[in-house]
Image (tube, rainbow, N blue to C red):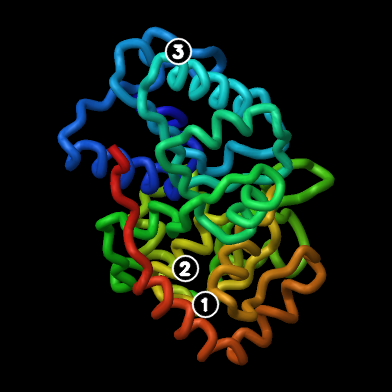
Amino acid sequence: MFVNDTSGFHCGSRAACEVIVAGLLRGGHEVIAERSKSELDLQAMEDSDAVLVNGEGTLHDNSPRAMRILRLLELAQQARKPTAICNASWFRMGNQYDHVLRKLDTFDVRESLSRDLLRQRHGVEAGLYLDASYFHPAIPDPSRQTPARIRMTDLYWPGLRGFARPTGGQLARFEFLKMDELSWQVMLDYVGASGALLTGRHHGVYAACRARVPFVALSGNTPKIEGLVAWAGLGLPVTSEVGELGGLLAGIGRYRRTFEILFEWMDAQPAWVCPF
């Protein structure tokens, strides 16, 4: 059973899910899809031999969806089925399901801040892998798009408690990439034809890294971008202040060598493999 297919969010999430499902199929598994995100799909759990959760950006803030996923894992463990979480971030979660986390066959997160929180607050040791989208077979082809100095995705606005495109000021002048309307291939082509990407999206950062293009990032609803930066151990242009974005973009050339090191480091990371 594959839980939390986030393909409908945007092209980065879709790319990650395609990689995960392809890994399950390569492992010889038949994949049972979760039929509802608003209630427990107990029938699919009962019909499956194992349960794999795509954690992605869902396991934070004790959200109802996060709680349902952990409850489903608890029931699967009670039925003696193998369980695992992959491709996850973990922020601001309570301890009520620590017993479930400790019984997982594997728990893999996408950045070091989540790993450290799980270790310190939950007594759980998680594995570290890049977001699954990084291993999607699409290859950036900048020749398919018109070159641009800067392109951007949407940004997270705390006041709105959501992601949105700037509607005024300097930021609104940049060509906008609407990730929920693009394929991952087209996204990589656009980013590859850019001098830099301005993004508030975790998968925007991954698109830039796949295309080997510098980025400037604004913090999202959880610090998963900062977690990737912390894991890499590099000082990169990531900020929580919208007012700092212009200056970071203007000085992006100072980070040229740092980005080269980042891209080489990411290329050296092992790909996620199916735990079952």
Which of the two labelled residues, at mark 2 and mark 1, occupies the earlier sequence position?
Answer: 2
* Looking at the image, residue 24 lies above or below residue 256: above
Front-most of residues 212 and 224: 224
Residue 150 location (% of width, % of height): 56, 73
Disc 1, SS: loop
Residue 165 visible in the shown view? no
Residue 214: numbered disc = 1
Residue at point 47%, 62% (across, down) = 206
Q: Camera-side residue: 20 or 209?
A: 20
Q: Nearer the viewer, residue 63 or 241?
A: 63
Check if mark 2's residue and mark 3's residue have beta carbons within 8 Å: no
Report the amino acid beneath label 1.
Pro
Q: Residue at x 67, y 87 (%)?
A: 251
Closer to us: 76 or 170: 76
Q: Is residue 249 visible?
A: yes
Left or right: 234 as drawn, with respect to 51: right
Q: Which mark is residue 41?
A: 3
Looking at the image, is mark 2 or mark 3 earlier in the sequence? 3
Query: Mark 2 or 3, which is nearer the eye?
Result: 3
User: Of the residues shown, which amino acid type is indicated by label 3?
Assistant: Asp
N-terminal-most mark, 1 or 3? 3
Label drawn at residue 208: 2
Q: Are marks 1 and 3 in contact (CB under 8 Å)?
A: no
Q: Is residue 272 above or below residue 122?
A: below
Disc 2 crowd, CA 10 A, few/some/many (<14, 14-19, 20+): many
**Disc 2 and disc 1 in contact, CB within 8 angstroms:** yes
**SS at mark 3 in the image:** loop
Q: CA distance from mark 1 to mark 3?
A: 42 Å
- At a point 48% along the width and 78% down the height, the residue shown is 262
Element carrying mark 2: helix
